[in-house]
């Protein structure tokens, strides 16, 4: 199934590149959550060998904080956008984006498509891509 953005009757139109970028950021959610949990327990590479022109990174703690902050902001943006979707449609929209599953038959496909567009749009807005 190909990823495409609804064009007719869609209030949440994004540029194609931004739409695809956000969809893949949402699909990367579980990896980001795992990395976010593991980043604190990761040990440094020990790159400082005492040489004046060594290749060791400057401040590894600061770089981990920046990496953790970036992952945290992306996961929170996805979670906030998902919370804006009504409860009864969240699972269908989430599975459609994550697993490329068909929408459930409990509502019309256009309803799910509308909420999927809204979720992608709100995620892009929270990530300051638009």
Image (cartoon, rainbow, N blue to C red):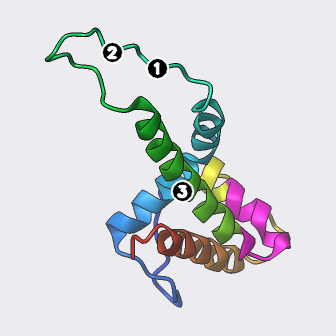
**Image x and y of residue 31, in percent:** 59, 38
Q: Which of labels 3 and 1 is toward the front?
A: 1
Q: Compared to 33, does 41 lie above or below?
A: above
Q: Residue at x 39, y 70 (%)?
A: 129
Check the picture and name the quadrant holding the C terminus.
bottom left
Say whether disc 3 or disc 1 marks the residue closer to the N-terminus: 1
Q: Determine the image quadrant of residue 93.
A: bottom right
Q: Is 124 or 108 nearer to us in this picture?
A: 124
- Viewer-closest of 72 and 118: 72
Q: Residues within 10 Å of mark 2 (few under 14, many from 20)?
A: few
Whether residue 92 sits left or right of residue 59 in the image: it is: right
Q: Which residue position is annotated with label 1?
A: 44
- What residue is rendered at 30% in x and 27% in y? 57
Q: Residues within 10 Å of mark 1 (few under 14, many from 20)?
A: few
Which span of residues is magenta-colored? 83-95
Give the numbered dot on residue 74.
3
Q: Residue at x 59, y 64 (%)?
A: 77
């Amino acid at each position: 199934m190909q990823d495409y953005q609804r064009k007719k009757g869609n209030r949440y139109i994004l540029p194609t590149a931004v739409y695809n970028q956000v969809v893949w950021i949402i699909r990367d959610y579980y990896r980001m959550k795992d990395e976010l949990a593991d980043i604190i327990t990761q040990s440094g590479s020990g790159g400082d060998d005492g040489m004046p022109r060594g290749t060791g990174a400057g401040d590894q703690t600061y770089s981990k904080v920046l990496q953790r902050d970036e992952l945290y902001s992306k996961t929170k943006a996805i979670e906030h956008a998902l919370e804006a979707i009504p409860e009864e449609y969240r699972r269908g929209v989430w599975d459609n984006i994550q697993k490329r599953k068909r929408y459930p038959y409990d509502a019309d496909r256009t309803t799910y498509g509308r909420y999927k567009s809204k979720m992608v749009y709100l995620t892009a807005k929270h990530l300051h891509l638009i």
